[in-house]
Image (spheres, grey):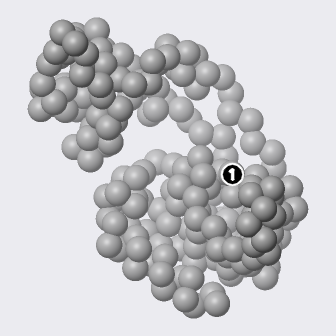
């Protein structure tokens, strides 16, 4: 990130990161890098409980083994296998590829390897800085499990200028509520100029 911004001759930028992108922002800040403002979307400060993602991977692998041939059938099957809603099922289905024989597979070729990696403990360094001059917007999906009350308290400690926006959405807040998300982010950036 430092090299990219330097190569573009950008000194101060507003950044936005969803999930892993939010983790990247936090890692940059933890290591002394600064931004004009940050918008962190639906990710907490603690190691993730990857059981939800593993459940999705297992559902995708099962769908592959069943060699289903229709998108509506795959969507329904993913939801039967524990994917919580149509929006998440359709998000996962963006990785589908139709094979020559008509059945679908997921572009994520290494579901088993991904599953094994997610079973390893998530290591996150503690965040000991207080960024009292940097505005931060935390956008949280009310139907998501990625940010809990303890995370919110830590965010408030780290970012005294923290604003919190909770939207009726799952983890993919920007996809579930695109208009409200853009409105919240736009208001935040305009107010922090």
Tell whether 51 sits left or right of 62: right
Judge from the rendering whether residue 9 lies leftward or rightward of residue 181; answer left or right. Answer: right
Q: Is residue 42 above or below residue 77?
A: below
Residue plotted at (29% across, 25% down): 97
SS label for mark 1: helix
Could you say where residue 6 lies in the image, as x and y percent from the top left?
A: 81, 64
Left or right: residue 28 compared with residue 183: right
Q: Is residue 109 above or below residue 65?
A: below
Left or right, residue 135 beside residue 20: right
- Residue at 78% x, 82% y: name it: 133
Tell me if mark 1 has few (under 14), some (14-19) or many (20+) residues whose alpha carbon lies within 10 angstroms of its own.
some
Q: Report the quarter where the N terminus lies.
A: bottom right
Residue shown at the point (50%, 66%) measured from the top left? 139
Residue carrying label 1: 24
Tell me where residue 85 sits by quadrant.
top left
| Residue 177 drawn at (x, y percent) | 32, 65
């Amino acid at each position: 990130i430092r090299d990219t911004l330097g190569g573009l001759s950008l000194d101060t930028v507003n950044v936005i990161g969803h999930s892993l992108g939010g983790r990247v922002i936090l890692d940059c800040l933890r290591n002394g890098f600064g931004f004009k403002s940050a918008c962190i979307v639906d990710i907490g400060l603690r190691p993730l409980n990857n059981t939800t993602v593993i459940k999705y991977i297992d559902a995708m692998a099962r769908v592959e083994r069943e060699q289903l041939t229709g998108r509506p059938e795959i969507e329904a099957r993913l939801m039967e296998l524990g994917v919580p809603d149509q929006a998440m099922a359709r998000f996962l289905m963006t990785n589908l590829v139709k094979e020559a024989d008509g059945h679908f597979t997921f572009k994520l070729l290494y579901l088993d390897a991904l599953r094994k990696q997610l079973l390893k403990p998530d290591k996150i360094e503690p965040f000991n800085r207080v960024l009292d001059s940097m505005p931060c917007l935390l956008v949280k999906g009310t139907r998501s499990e990625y940010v809990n009350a303890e995370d919110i308290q830590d965010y408030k400690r780290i970012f005294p200028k923290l604003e919190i926006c909770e939207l009726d959405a799952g983890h993919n807040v920007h996809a579930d509520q695109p208009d409200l998300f853009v409105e919240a982010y736009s208001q935040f950036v305009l107010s922090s100029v």
